[in-house]
Image: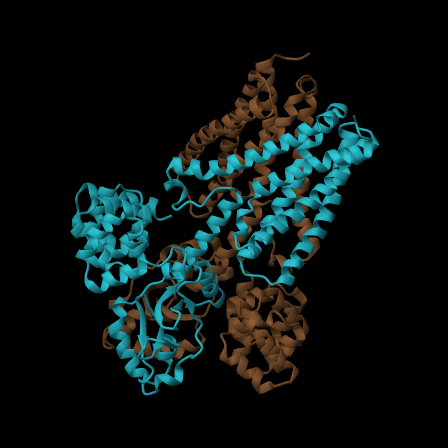
Chain colours: A cyan, B brown
Amino acid sequence: MFDRLLLPDLRELLETSDTEGLREFCEALHPAVVAEVLGRLDSIEVWRVLSSCSPETRVSIFQHLELPRQEELARELDRGQLSKLIEEMAPDDRVDLLSRLSEERVQTLLPLIAQAERNDIQRLLSLPEGSTGSIMTTEYASLRAEITVGEAIDQLRSQAPNRETIYYIYVIDESRELRGVVSLRELILAQPKTPLKDLIFTEPIAVRVGDDQETTAQTLARLDLIAVPVVDDHNHLVGIVTHDDVMDVLQEEATEDAYLQGAVGTLEDSYLQTPLITLAWKRGIWLMFLSIVALVTAEVLNRYEHVSRAYAWMVLFLPLVLASGGNAGSQSATLIIRTLALGSLSREENLRMAWREFLVGLTLGGVLAAIGYSAALIWFGLTIPQACVVAFTVLLVVVMGTVCGAALPILFRRLGMDPALMSNPLIAALVDVLGVVIYYSVAIFALGAIK
Amino acid sequence: MFDRLLLPDLRELLETSDTEGLREFCEALHPAVVAEVLGRLDSIEVWRVLSSCSPETRVSIFQHLELPRQEELARELDRGQLSKLIEEMAPDDRVDLLSRLSEERVQTLLPLIAQAERNDIQRLLSLPEGSTGSIMTTEYASLRAEITVGEAIDQLRSQAPNRETIYYIYVIDESRELRGVVSLRELILAQPKTPLKDLIFTEPIAVRVGDDQETTAQTLARLDLIAVPVVDDHNHLVGIVTHDDVMDVLQEEATEDAYLQGAVGTLEDSYLQTPLITLAWKRGIWLMFLSIVALVTAEVLNRYEHVSRAYAWMVLFLPLVLASGGNAGSQSATLIIRTLALGSLSREENLRMAWREFLVGLTLGGVLAAIGYSAALIWFGLTIPQACVVAFTVLLVVVMGTVCGAALPILFRRLGMDPALMSNPLIAALVDVLGVVIYYSVAIFALGAIK
């Protein structure tokens, strides 16, 4: 958005090697905006720009670069430069970067990093990907309960420079057990002499370090919080997850679900940054599987070859039959998968969803059957019994499609698998097989078996 | 998540009419959690719970109820109760509710609401839905530049109780023109005697009141902000958009895109809250359109009837041909639509996307063609020329599918339409028509025309 506006300025500063100008450019703008403009330059130019500004600005711009870009730069920096940069990065951001570097590279870097940061890095790196721990930061503001508001603000002032947020302050006891939370807003509103105890909200909502990151993101989003505390199994405070990381997680999960819906495997980076070979693989594996299902449909058609030969008109409506079932099924799967993604449902709600889908399927099936009937009769000049075969098949196929589309994602969830794996093309492919069976069975039943 | 745990407690409090207990229940828990539990009760019970707690708690719980629920309650309250509730709601939340009530109902309510709030409501109600104005709140903290940090904190203390956030403070001049922003963190870190001027970031990123809400949400998300200021055409500060509303917008837009991807029209409420008739309509309109496209495919098949009769084996591979093109197209459309949703792209990037899709299409087409060839030869016992027809068709159809799947959403964006309208089933349906033409043309070309 801003990148195309500012790029010419930056290029000129680079061409004239105007170090002072480059520094000003970096300091005057929001680091995320600078990072966006830098996204248009090559790595050597990016490092020239970053070298010209102060260490703090450099780090905050670097943290806003996209991960593949950070990785690229990290490969080009020497150990000294890189370790210094990593030392100053936010705990969650640096772990994201380190987890993309090779094991050996990380091992050569760690000795150059200060002890405290090193321990922090090793602890965070050991947490499983996708867990709440993997998106938390360890730079939170914390206080003890036995002080006044005035003292609290003083202590906060000394903590503030290297805390990700100071707007929520967590109250812990001597064993770091989480006892409550107080907001900076409440501290500002209260009299300095007030005991901190009086302001503490003692039932803070906390998440577990091992919780799924998506669940944590949903919790924070639902409660409209800026940050949520992360505790271990003994209720000890180990970190916080902040709103900005939650937004990233929500966007990532939405992207992942959208890809799965279209039968594309999860990509680690954005579309344009993913190598073609990865893209082909993530898609090819699905397409191959779907081709096999299509070949099963072919085999089913093969079994009914004698019917096809007797009723040649049937092939005309094959696309309509396949599309009706597949499309209705895709719709149901889409609705159910998204509903499941936005929150867990009770058993009754699951049953209610399936029942609703059945009713909607009946309605839609009826409408499409009417269209199919009229088209068969008027457009394609078939006989009434033939048109009835088309209409009745469409009705059955649509109902079957909606029920499969609704039931399969629910079943997947019950089995502990990601319901989103039931992608539109997969539902359509499965419904195709059944659709052909239904079509030919109806024809045989209505028009008589052919030997 | 919490609702099932806490519901039995709440039910017991209601049955024993324990008003004091109900009050404690509401005050001890986060309002969003209480709202979640209330989601399981009927309206009369909900109001009984809300009546038992203090006005502030009541409003904050009410604001966390889902909109259809709020609407339901609003219908049952008398004018007096409702107008009092609305007066105390946050400006953005109350406008969301009011815009769902009937025009007459709003007109009977407005006279009961205090003048200041009434003007605010009327201004916000007049902003178009989907615009940044429709998600902003007018309760922001603002200061003048010519004071010290100590004075700023004092002034903030008096503003704080009814501001949505005080963590970003906007600096305005006498005409309310936006001059800069300062964070509460910086105020806390600075000495009380410091002039506020020294801390102000004078190039704040602001959005326009008429901007699309999605663009604003992306801006806030990208810059990791808690709030972003909203200005009118003269750079006058008119409101702020906060992180929690942005999360809602991002989730809504992701849901809308997911629905469109599966060929379901946008639903205003969640799936389970949408009436069946609305659901049937939002899906039926798409299915009917897709059926018509499928009938065009039938018409094309009809034109090639003489070929079908001569080469009866062709019908077997029809599902494979249709599925290959449709699935490859769905994948491309999915990737392109999601990439377009996450940020606007330059002309070169659009071309690069289309070129990448072409290359991936060639690769995938080659692989699927090989599978089709082997299956035709070995599984279905076709001749080599026949298997070649299948293989070559699959290759062409996959390439055509990927190119259409990539190009159509880009074209839609260029035409100023939502690229997400190019749903998976629509791409599949369009590709089906072309797929049949390709299949039969290849057959005629390879095996000879039939009179």
Kindly identify the residue that appears in the image at 73 percent across and 23 percent down: A309
**Residue at 18% from the left image edge and 56% from the top image edge:** A111
Closer to the camera in the image, B137 or A348? A348
Residue B274 visible here: no
Q: Residue at x 38, y 40 (%)?
A: A274
Quadrant of the image containing the C terminus of chain A:
top right
Q: Is residue B73 left or right of residue A396?
A: left
Decide: is B63 above or below B441.
below
Q: Nearer the viewer, residue A255 or B446?
A: B446
Q: Residue B290: x, y in percent?
A: 65, 38
Q: Is residue A184 left or right of residue A76?
A: right
Q: Give the left or right position of residue B397, taking residue B178 as reference.
A: right
x then y, percent, for residue A134: 36, 58
The x, y position of residue B137, in whole percent, is 47, 66
Name the one closer to the observer, A432 or A70.
Answer: A432
Tell me if residue B20 can be seen.
yes
Task: Pinpoint residue B390: horizontal percent, then vertical percent.
Answer: 56, 23
Tell me: A411 left or right of A238. Answer: right
The front one of A344 and A159 is: A344
Quarter assignment of residue A438: top right
User: Does residue B244 lie above or below A308 as drawn?
Assistant: below
The mark tally for this picture is 0
